[in-house]
Image (cartoon, rainbow, N blue to C red):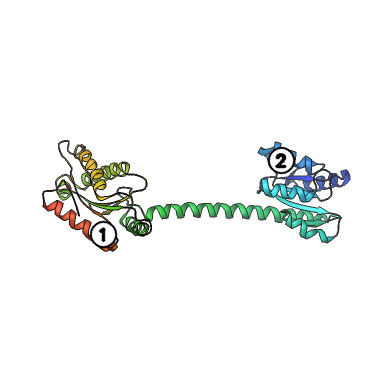
Amino acid sequence: MSTKRILLVEDNEGQKLYLHHLLERTGCYNVTSVNNGLEAVNFLNNNTKIIPNIIITDIVMPEINGYELSNFVRNNFSGIFVIIITGADNSYIGESFNSGAIDYLSKPINELELLARVKNVIRLQRAERILKKTILKLKTTNKILKKNSITDDLTGIHNRRYVIEQLKLKIYKFNRYKQPLSLVLVDIDNFKNINDTFGHDAGDSVLRKISNYVKESIRMSDVFGRFGGDEFLIIFSNTSKSEAVQKFNKIILEIKDFTFDFASDISVTLSAGIVEYQSSYTEKDFLSFADTMLYKAKKNGKNQVLCQ
């Protein structure tokens, strides 16, 4: 076990020497002694690389008393635990704990009790560190799980579950603020032929490249995700139907010029159906109308946008 550091704060020279010797002779503690609370504060502020594990402090001292020191430690050095010792009666216990102290001892000090209390505080610190690490690990794990639950594994963009949740939210906001809202349902033309001709790895590379481009092409306020297979959904916030068509036609033109390692001469095109939300629509209507427009775009020759 590593040696723990203790800062002893005591204005009585004899008591200070006695406690210092008592703690250090155990071989478990490296003790630094100061004469009052002001010296303790200065030590903490000027020795941030050797912060003590525990402060043992008297209450009645000049400049800064034990309560003020304990409160200072609580507000500025939360990892340090304070034990207050005093020759006063037990009526001071409540104020000691209210100041932030972890424990309280009355003078005259019983050696065995002091050492036992210090050991207990060390155990508490160790338990608190383990708890904090566990909580941090859980938070990190939960963050990863949350991200994974809304992310498409292949493309790294949002998955169907997320975009549907966001669609509900966007519809709610439309009904409240009446700002235009447009939905784009996108399909990669002849995607099955790519898979059949060049293999699924080639198809996956197409999905990833298109996903990354579209993600970078839209605003932070818009929502983009994989709807299933080679279909994608874009929710354009505060965007009319005509604006959505203009935005997505630019994306189509750019993607048409993409090149791919598996076949330099292949050209990938997109078809899309676009619908602007109306207050009479249900969520199901909204998606269904976009799907209908996409179907017509595919039937009419692909590589185009149709809107309702």
Q: Which residue is mark 1?
A: 286
| Mark 1 vs 2: CB contact within 8 A | no
- Decide which of 93, 24 is in the foreground and name it: 93
- Decide which of 242, 122 is in the foreground and name it: 242
* Number of residues whose C-alpha sits closer than 10 Å to that of mark 2, classed few (under 14), some (14–19) or many (20 or more): some
Q: Is residue 299 left or right of residue 158?
A: left
Whether residue 116 is visible here, answered yes or no, is no
Above-or-below relation of 12 to 99: above
Q: Residue at the location (74% across, 41% down)?
A: 41
Q: Residue at the location (22% across, 38% down)?
A: 254
- Decide which of 98, 204 is in the foreground and name it: 98
Q: Residue at the location (21% across, 59% down)?
A: 289
The answer to which quarter of the image holds residue 267 is: top left
Q: In this rendering, which labeled residue sits more in front, label 1 or label 2? A: 1
Q: Which residue is mark 2?
A: 44
Q: Amino acid at mark 1?
A: Phe
Question: Quick one: quadrant of the C terminus?
Answer: bottom left
Whether residue 194 is visible here, answered yes or no, is yes
Disc number placed over residue 302 in the picture, else none: none
Residue 75 rendering spot, x and y as whole percentages:
67, 48
Residue 24 rendering spot, x and y as whole percentages:
78, 45
Residue 237 rendering spot, x and y as whole percentages:
33, 50
